[in-house]
């Protein structure tokens, strides 16, 4: 290996693919490092604390060993290529990508505005209000986060890293004003769901079965505070009114 003083020195702008030489932790193996690899390590390990931010990998299929640990996804469907503006229900792991348990913090996000942004493509983002956060009916290592999108751009990229954080720049909805939301949980199987939302308006509604798959029924606006949905069979699940 040439001596360091024999290398040509340039003062060009640093690029993500530049390399420098170091060793492993034991000092036995010579390794190449790059700004990109260091950034990926920081994002994946969570070794640098950013208050209020947690990183998750977008996963369409469970990992062979760890299932959906450390991931964010859409329950019951493939997310890759889905418009971020179309998101309504996210499935979030109780642990972030660094395998740190973060569920107690995530529970505090209900009624808050959040931003979900792709780490390597920051123009792929969704700004939304969290209108519900409950334990997944089929997997207690996951929680269902129902959201109302405020603004979004781009599409989901499977296996990419996403940062989830509180978004302080957006105003919080004040009860009695703005775009109100309500969640109904149908715990007893029924062919007719009655969602009493008390929003004081003829609300739109989205319905999901117990597996988190979007389902459709015949909707009837009973009043400005109540809506019923009829299905062809008795089902359990959740409905979201806004």
Image: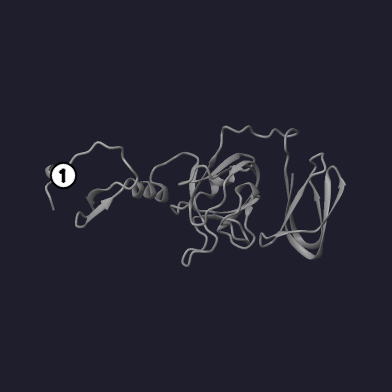
> Few, some or many C-alpha atoms within 10 Å of disc 1 (few <14, some 14-19, many ≥20)?
few
Task: Tell me the quarter of the image containing the C terminus.
Answer: top right
Can residue 25 be seen in this snapshot?
no
Closest to the observer: 106 or 223? Answer: 223
The location of residue 142, given as percent across then percent down, is 57, 57
Q: In x, y percent, where is residue 112?
A: 61, 39
- Asked whether residue 85 appears in the rendered view, the answer is yes
State whether residue 139 is above or below residue 154: below
Asked if 237 appears above or below 49 in the picture, the reply is below
Residue at 56%, 41% (x, y): give it. 115
Is 42 positioned to the left or the right of 192 in the image? left
Q: Nearer the viewer, residue 173 or 87?
A: 87
Q: Position of residue 79 (x, y in %)?
A: 58, 57
The mark tally for this picture is 1
Q: Element under label 1? A: loop
Query: Which residue appears at 63% of the width and 32% of the height?
Result: 171
Mark 1 — residue? 7
Q: In this image, 230 relative to 136: left or right?
A: right
Q: Residue at x 75, y 33 (%)?
A: 176
């Amino acid at each position: 290996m040439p001596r360091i003083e024999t290398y040509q020195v340039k003062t060009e702008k640093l690029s993500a693919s530049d390399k420098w030489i170091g060793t492993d932790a034991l000092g036995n193996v010579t390794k190449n490092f790059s700004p990109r690899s260091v950034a990926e390590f920081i994002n994946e390990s969570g070794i640098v604390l950013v208050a209020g931010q947690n990183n998750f990998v977008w996963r369409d299929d469970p990992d062979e060993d760890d299932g959906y640990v450390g991931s964010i996804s859409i329950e019951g469907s493939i997310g890759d290529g889905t418009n971020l503006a179309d998101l309504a229900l996210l499935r979030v792991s109780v642990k972030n990508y660094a395998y740190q348990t973060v569920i107690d913090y995530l529970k505090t996000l209900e009624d808050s505005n959040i931003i979900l942004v792709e780490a390597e493509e920051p123009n792929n983002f969704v700004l939304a209000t969290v209108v519900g956060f409950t334990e997944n009916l089929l997997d207690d290592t996951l929680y269902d986060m129902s959201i109302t999108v405020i603004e979004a751009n781009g599409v989901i990229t499977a296996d990419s890293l996403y940062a989830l954080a509180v978004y302080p720049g957006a105003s919080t909805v004040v009860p009695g004003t703005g775009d109100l939301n309500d969640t109904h949980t149908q715990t007893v199987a029924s062919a007719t769901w009655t969602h009493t939302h008390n929003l004081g308006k003829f609300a739109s509604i989205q319905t999901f079965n117990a597996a988190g798959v979007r389902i459709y029924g015949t909707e009837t606006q009973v009043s400005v505070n109540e809506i019923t949905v009829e299905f062809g069979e008795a089902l359990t699940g959740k409905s979201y009114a806004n």
